[in-house]
Image: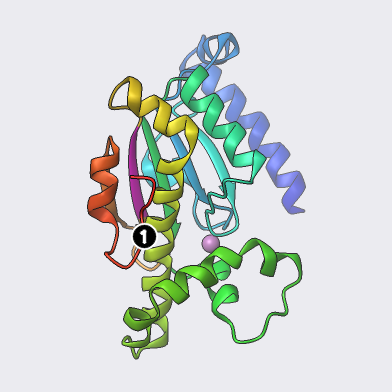
Amino acid sequence: MEYYDRILEFNRKWASDMVADDPSYFERHAKGQSPHTLFIGCSDSRVQTNTLTGTEQGEMFVHRNIANQVYSSDLNVLAALEYAVYVLDVKHIIVCGHYGCGGITAASAAEAAHGVVDHWLAQIRTIMRLHQEELDAITEPERRLDRLAELNVIEQVYNLSCTPVIREAWERGRRPIIHGVVYDIRTGLLKELATRLDGPDKVKAILPSTVAIPSF
Ligand code: CO
């Protein structure tokens, strides 16, 4: 059976199983959503938001792109962020990177040969330059890429904290709470890199001293 046919067959069975188990399940969902978390992650097929966090439909508002980037010029992530914070009033935002990320590997490749993706990943090369000394000191290539994936998460958390939406939200109170994690595709575990950030003071603490922070 084709993958696509399998998807449709599964869907029919799943929908009827859900109703059998909880007759008002879809009725409740049709009325609206009130997710507690905005999840910003990589598009990678091995990082399945609900599966690895044990969350159900309706719990996470999700934005994914290659290498979980937060660009202040990316209307897509900014719109998702604004809607999640102003309208859905999410309590948490999780920025989730992962080891074995193709985006991280592509960005660190010596030759730029991936087309548009090279433009999309430009920020990762800046992160490499900012942390060159630390990365150069790691001799094992896989471990060096792991660390770059971690530094990328921290940088995206920082970018997120600099957006007007978050700065304004934090001026009103200490939410949403931002977390930066990396998912280990080799073990299935999440590792915390920046946890429970609920104000600019907390962001300062996660940044390496080499990073200039004129806005805080
Ligand atoms: Co990835």
Q: Secondary structure at mark 1?
A: loop
Q: Identity of the amino acid at label 1?
A: Ala
Residue at the front extreme of this rendering: 214
Residue 64 shown in magenta: no
The range drawn in magenta is 177-181
Name the spot of residue 14 as percent of width and height, x first: 58, 30
Occupied quadrant, residue 26: top right
Residue 102 spot, x, y in % from top left: 57, 70
Q: Is residue 4 above or below residue 122?
A: above
Q: Residue at x 72, y 38 (%)?
A: 8
Mark 1 highlights which residue?
212
Q: Is residue 68 visible?
A: yes
| Quarter occupied by residue 115 | bottom right
Q: How many marks?
A: 1
User: 200 and 189: which one is in front?
Assistant: 200
Q: Position of residue 214 (x, y in %)?
A: 38, 51
Q: Nearer the viewer, residue 210 or 193?
A: 210
* Magenta span includes 180: yes
Is residue 56 in view?
no
Task: Pick whichever, 34 or 53, lies toward us.
Answer: 34
The residue positioned 28% from the left and 36% from the top of the image is 199
